[in-house]
Image (tube, helix red, strand yellow):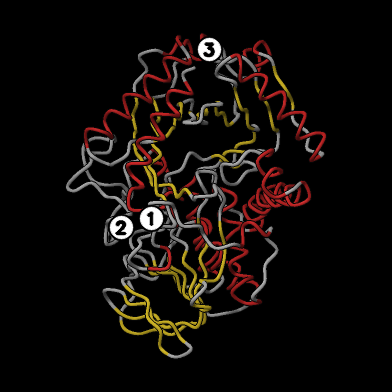
Amino acid sequence: MSICDPGSTRINPAQGKAYDPLTADGPGRGRPHALSYWAATAGEEPPHDGSLTGDREVDIAIVGAGYTGLAAALHLACEYNLSIAVLEANRIGWGCSGRNGSFARVAFGRLGKQEWIDRYGINQARLMLDEARQGLNHLRSLIEVHNIDCDLTEGGSLEVAHRPRHARRLEELHRLLEESFDYRTELLDSTAIADRHYRGSEIHAGLFDSRSFGVHPLKLAHGLARAARDAGAALHVGSPALAIRRDGPHRVLETPGGRLIARTVIIATNGYTGERLVPQLKGRTMPVLSNIVVTRAMTAAEKTASNFVSDALIHDTRKLRSYYRRLPDNRILMGGRGPITESPAEMAAQTEHLTATIGNIWPALSGITADYAWGGWVNMTRDSLPHLYWLEDDPAVIVAMGYNGTGVPYSIAAGRHAAQLAVTARCEAPGPLLAPLERFMMSAFRRLGQRALYKLWGYQDGR
């Protein structure tokens, strides 16, 4: 049984009105997965409990069956033996948990390490790096303990200087990590990159971190779902939360088929967070598109000509960064920032841009075609950090979101923290991550600001 959108092509057609989380009532109901490489290769969907019908009372309700919601459900069911129900509007891992670039790195948010120090001081910055490192280790542990088959690929990660002047920046980061954080990385010159990873253009230096690994994102979501359900959590698909209202000490979540009544609610919707469901979040999220193409498999001659032998997760030093990796079946995944909207014209143009980028980086692969192309909404925050906190005016609702495009390991760590917070009212995350989401200035004009910022960053990246 296919879990993808029906159709004769694996390049996603944008149909109907372009979806935007800032203005839409919600992400739909019961929609199939995007036409992605991950959906095409994920295998059978995990068991679930169907749509919610009638009234049901649980200890904790979770909105969103992505990494954060599933991880929270898993930990609550396993460690605290509570009754848990997850509401998912569409399918398990339907959002960016099943569509992302597959990079599991020691990272969260978009701030550089020097910015951590400048904003929060060296002691807090060290705690933040340790938090990111623990997040990656926690993901690896979950995969092992629950025997999750998600095509884990060891290969490390490589940040590549796309301009000569950015080589100096990588040298400074290498020194900062070692001297201020006692964190070891390896600085590579262009020759070492060509020998060990790939030959091509835009490789003036690189910073290699051996700790990182790749995953199959949707298989990972499916594995978390199986583990959570085996532990006793209920997973209701095709059940969008339409409203949340107070009823004494409980919160009642309205769905098309019934009501879920709980004493605590965890909102884990990240880039697909609608501002109408949780009015307290109005103006505090910035969903932006990230797009990916996956090519046909390289021929033996193409692989030899490009020497693309690396299993590393690679990204460049652009502000509007490109990220890419060689998949286990010798296809190339190429991702980058998406267009402003999901209109057919903008999505098609972005597919062409990403495919052309492959030819720019690897001249030997110029003309390679994309078998799959898709996009997903990433949640950016004003301070470029993820956030985990109780709503200020409702101590029964926890918010966990804002991964800024680096959420594969940390969204799962945030789910564990949300579970701990729901039960004990405390968690171990560093202080800056526990603050409420900040409101964007002139939030009604976020899309206009995004267009202007993309133009500025595009200009800076080309210098």
In the rendered image, residue 224, in percent from the top left (x then y), is placed at: 53, 58
Measure the C-alpha gap from mark 3 to mark 2.
Answer: 40 Å
Measure the C-alpha gap from mark 1 to mark 3.
Answer: 36 Å
Q: Which residue is mark 1?
A: 272
Q: Which residue is mark 3?
A: 200
**Residue 244 to residue 186: above or below:** below
Circle 1 residues within 10 Å: few <14, some 14–19, many ≥20: many
Q: Which residue is mark 2?
A: 27
**Residue 159 to residue 263: above or below:** above
Measure the C-alpha gap from mark 1 to mark 2.
Answer: 7 Å
**Residue at x 22%, y 32% (from the top left corner):** 345
In the rendered image, residue 307, in percent from the top left (x then y), is placed at: 56, 13
Q: Disc 2 marks which amino acid?
A: Pro
**Residue at x 49%, y 54% (from the top left corner):** 221
Residues at badges 1 and 2 in contact (C-beta under 8 Å)? yes
Q: Nearer the viewer, mark 1 or mark 3?
A: 1
In the rendered image, residue 321, in percent from the top left (x then y), is placed at: 49, 30
Hey, which quadrant is residue 53 in on the image? bottom left
